[in-house]
Image (spheres, rainbow, N blue to C red):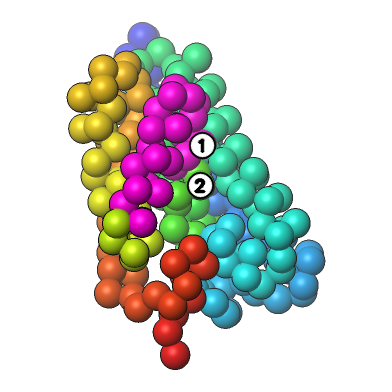
Amino acid sequence: METVIVLLYTLGFALLGYLTGSLSFALWVTRLFKGIDVREAGSRHATATNTLRQAGFGAFVIVAVLDVAKGFLPTWLALHYAPAPWIPPLTAALVVIGHCWPLFADFRGGMGNASTGGVILAAAPLAFVIGLGILVALTLILRHSARASALTGLLLAPAFWLLGLGSEAIWIAAAAGVVIAYRFLIDWNRQYHELWLDREQR
């Protein structure tokens, strides 16, 4: 009976994570503000930065906050109510998978940075700050945001381990980080013109 309960919790949180991640706020907010599909211009991804480019700063703030929140909420719930230690990392990974390949937006979504920030924030606020610092530092060094993001995804868990953060943060970062690293391979060779806005050189 206990095994069945754990299995039901696992499936329930996995579904919650993916469906929450599939809420494509960049797509919906940009349509609301400008009546356009954010994926048809700029980086062609449903991201907060592409929302900034297409719909302005106000829309960007709304999308960024909502994308972080959709990573935070299901992961926080899993951390506090799931009966098995593998459920929070699984939930976190599926949130990011849903963000990148959303059910509600024809599986054409964002890149997962904001939702990854949300799942890590749920595990440990300090981990969120450290992860953001790693991302910013690598972006400044490499001057290529896709490569910086992919490497950050791979480095988060080892960095948290070296810094002595809790196992919850480490495993959640590992699960979400693998998804991030894979997702950003699509832009690995992209040529950038504007460092922060990801505009492709023409």
Work out which residue is located at the far top of the displayed protein and give it. Answer: 2
Please provide percent x and percent y for residue 105. Answer: 57, 63
Answer whether labels 1 and 2 touch (C-beta < 8 Å).
Answer: yes
Which residue is the site of mark 1? 118
Please provide percent x and percent y for residue 166. Answer: 32, 16
Quarter of the view holding residue 134: top left
Q: State whether residue 173 appears in this view.
A: yes
Which residue shows up at 58% across the image and 58% down it? Answer: 48
- Crowding around mark 1 (Cα neighbors within 10 Å: few <14, some 14 to 19, many 20+) is many
**Could you tell me the amino acid type at mark 1?**
Gly
Which residue is the site of mark 2? 114
Q: State whether residue 91 appears in this view.
A: no
| Quadrant (top left/top right/bottom left/bottom right) for the C terminus | bottom left
Which residue shows up at 26% across the image and 51% down it? Answer: 151
- Looking at the image, residue 168 lies above or below residue 152: above
Please provide percent x and percent y for residue 75. Answer: 48, 29
Which residue shows up at 35% across the image and 48% down it? Answer: 137
| Quadrant (top left/top right/bottom left/bottom right) for the N terminus | top left
Q: Which residues are magenta?
A: 116-140
Q: Nearer the viewer, residue 20 or 162?
A: 162
